[in-house]
C-alpha cells in the first residue's frame, strides 16, 4: 500500500507538509479534513444552523439526513492534477470550507459515526484512483482509515505556536514577524478556539485524534517547514524504496 498517513491537531503543519511531501514524491495529496468541512458546509447551507438541536451528537440534523444530502448534492473529492479537491454540487469549495462558520461546527459533524464511515469509504476509493501513492492527512488516518500505511507521521506543536500559525495564515502574513503585530486578545481567542476543537476531536467516542502506536512523532514547534518536509521525504524514500 503506497500511503503516507499524516495526523495531528489543527494547525500543526499537516497541510503544508502533506502538500510539499506529495509534490516532491510525485504522489497525490488528500486532505480528509476538507471532506468533513465540505459536508459541514453542505449541512449548514441546506439543513440550517440548528444551533439548539445539534448539541453533542449532531442532534436534529440526523445522520440519515446528512448522508442523504451528501449523496444527493453530491459532496465529492475530485482529482485535479495530483490534488483531491472538495466539491459540493459540482462547485469547488476549497475556499468556502475555510470559513469561520464551517470551522466552528465541523467537529460536531465529524463526531457522527455514519459521517465518518462515509468519509472513510470515499478516502479508500480515492487512494485507489492514484496507485503511484497518496499522502493522506487528518486525525485518524494512521489509526482507522489506513491502519496498514507503511509510513505514519504524527505532527504536534505547542498550542500557542499553532494559534499563531492560524492567524498568520488568515492574515496572509506567512508567519514571519507576526508575533510583534498580533493582538494578544486575538491570539488568546484563537488559542482557545483551537483548544476547544482539539478537545472535541480528542475526546469523541469514534476515531478520536490520537497517534498510532507505530507513528513517528514530530514536534514542529521550532522546526522550519523545509526541515519538516525533508524529514518526511527521507523517511518515505527509505520506506518505499524498491
Ligand atoms: O485544517 P485544520 O487543522 O483546521 O482542520 P482540518 O484538517 O481541516 O479538519 C477539520 C475538522 O475535521 C477537525 O477539527 C476534525 O473535527 C475533523 N476531522 C476528523 O475528524 N478526522 C479527520 N481525519 C480529519 C478531520
Image: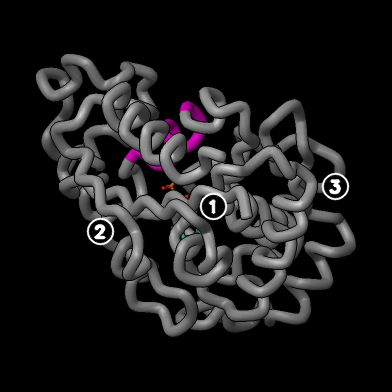
Q: Which mark is residue 114?
A: none
* Left/right of residue 214 with respect to residue 48 in the rendered view: left
Instruction: Categorize mark 2 by other alpha carbons within 10 Å: few (<14), some (14-19), many (20+).
Output: some
Q: Residue at x 47, y 27 (%)?
A: 20
Where residue 61 appears, as percent x and y from the top left, is: 67, 77
- Closer mark to the observer between disc 2 and disc 1: 1
Residue at the far front in the pictured view: 242
Which of the 4 quarters of the picture holds residue 39? bottom right
> Which residue has dot 3 on it?
89
Where residue 216 appears, as percent x and y from the top left, is: 30, 53
Q: Residue at x 64, y 36 (%)?
A: 28
Residue 106 visible to an observer of this rendering: no
> Which residue has dot 1 on it?
33
> Which residue has dot 2 on it?
195
Instruction: Categorize mark 3 by other alpha carbons within 10 Å: few (<14), some (14-19), many (20+).
Output: some
SS assignment at label 3: loop
Q: Quadrant of the N terminus?
A: bottom right
Q: Residue at x 60, y 64 (%)?
A: 49
* Left/right of residue 8 with respect to residue 25 in the rendered view: left
Above or below, comparing residue 159 to residue 60 in the picture = above
Instruction: Categorize mark 1 by other alpha carbons within 10 Å: few (<14), some (14-19), many (20+).
Output: many
Mark-to-mark CA distance, 2 and 3: 32 Å
Amino acid at each position: 500500500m503506497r500511503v503516507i498517513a499524516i495526523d495531528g491537531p489543527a494547525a500543526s503543519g499537516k497541510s503544508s507538509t502533506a502538500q510539499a511531501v506529495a509534490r516532491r514524491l510525485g504522489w497525490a495529496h488528500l486532505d480528509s479534513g476538507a471532506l468533513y468541512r465540505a459536508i459541514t458546509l453542505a449541512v449548514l447551507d441546506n439543513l440550517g444552523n440548528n444551533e439548539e438541536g445539534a448539541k453533542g451528537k449532531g442532534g436534529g440534523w440526523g445522520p440519515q439526513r446528512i448522508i442523504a444530502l451528501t449523496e444527493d448534492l453530491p459532496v465529492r473529492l475530485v482529482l485535479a492534477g495530483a490534488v483531491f479537491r472538495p466539491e459540493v454540487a459540482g462547485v469547488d469549495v476549497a475556499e468556502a470550507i475555510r470559513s469561520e462558520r464551517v470551522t466552528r461546527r465541523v467537529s460536531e459533524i465529524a463526531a457522527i459515526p455514519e459521517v465518518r464511515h462515509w468519509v472513510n469509504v470515499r478516502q479508500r476509493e480515492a487512494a485507489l484512483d492514484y496507485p503511484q501513492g497518496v499522502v493522506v492527512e487528518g486525525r485518524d488516518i494512521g489509526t482507522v482509515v489506513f491502519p496498514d500505511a507503511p509510513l505514519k507521521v504524527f505532527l504536534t506543536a505547542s498550542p500557542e505556536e499553532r494559534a499563531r500559525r492560524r492567524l498568520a495564515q488568515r492574515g496572509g502574513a506567512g508567519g514571519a514577524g507576526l508575533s510583534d503585530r498580533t493582538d494578544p486578545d486575538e491570539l488568546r481567542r484563537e488559542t482557545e478556539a483551537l483548544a476547544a476543537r482539539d478537545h472535541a476531536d480528542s475526546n469523541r467516542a469514534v476515531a478520536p485524534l490520537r497517534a498510532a502506536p507505530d507513528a513517528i512523532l514530530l514536534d514542529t514547534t521550532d522546526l522550519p517547514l523545509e526541515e519538516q518536509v525533508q524529514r518526511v521525504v527521507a523517511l518515505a524514500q527509505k520506506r518505499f524504496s524498491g
